Image: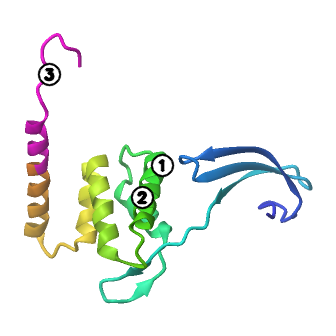
Amino acid sequence: MRCPFCQDAENKVIDSRESHEGSVIRRRRECLACKRRFTTYERVEELYPLIVKKDGRREAFDREKIVSGLKKACEKRPVSADKLEETVVAIERLLQGMGEKEINSSVIGEEVMRRLQQMDEVAYVRFASVYRSFRDISEFMHELKDLLEDQERERKAKPPLLPGRGS
């Protein structure tokens, strides 16, 4: 591991911690040459399925594409970076758990939308508008109508709080 500041290869680990439910090890390091500190992350290299695109092309799974899409959708929204990382890790685990060699990109897109809908509805609509490539405002309005109907069903399914029973 080379120092990002002086490029020297000699450094020492000052602190190691598990993060993201033990799937990543965070290491604080100190360069022995310039004495500056930096952080590295270590994760198991996992075998992911090939992603089958809409046009039939196959490409390697790229977690950064999911991260990028989530960041764009959640820009200027009250969604923490930790929540985004948890979402990406959960999607990665889902893909690995499927045990398939190839997975359609639509499976990933729909899973991202499902999780965004639970996390932040504005981010969900942003992502859906790009992912579903709405051709006109009526398609967009149809998606919003479905979202409002889902909210209403959830509201009706929750039992009302009884007075004096806490919040």
Disc ID at residue 161:
3
Neighbour class for label 1 at 10 Å: few (<14), some, many (≥20)?
few
Q: Residue placed farthest to the bottom in the image? A: 56
> Which residue: 40% across, 75% down?
100
- Locate residue 140: give its quadrant: bottom left
Q: Secondary structure at mark 1?
A: helix
Q: Which residues are magenta?
A: 150-167
Q: Quadrant of residue 58?
A: bottom left
Q: Nearer the viewer, residue 73 or 50?
A: 50
- Marks 2 and 3, the one that precedes in the sequence: 2
In the image, farthest residue toward the top: 164
- Estimate how packed mark 2 is, as few (under 14), some (14 to 19) or many (20 or more) residues with alpha carbons within 10 Å: some
The residue beneath circle 1 is: 81
Residue in the picture at 27% in, 48% down:
118
Residue at position x 13%, y 42% from top?
Answer: 154
Q: Position of residue 145 (x, y in %)?
A: 8, 56
Residue 135 horizontal/vertical position (percent): 15, 76
Three-letter code, disc 3: Leu
Q: Earlier in the sequence, mark 1 or mark 3?
A: 1
> Disc 1 to disc 2, how far (Cα)?
9 Å
Which amino acid type is shown beneath numbered disc 2? Lys
Residue 160 located within the stretch drawn in magenta: yes
Disc 2: which residue: 71
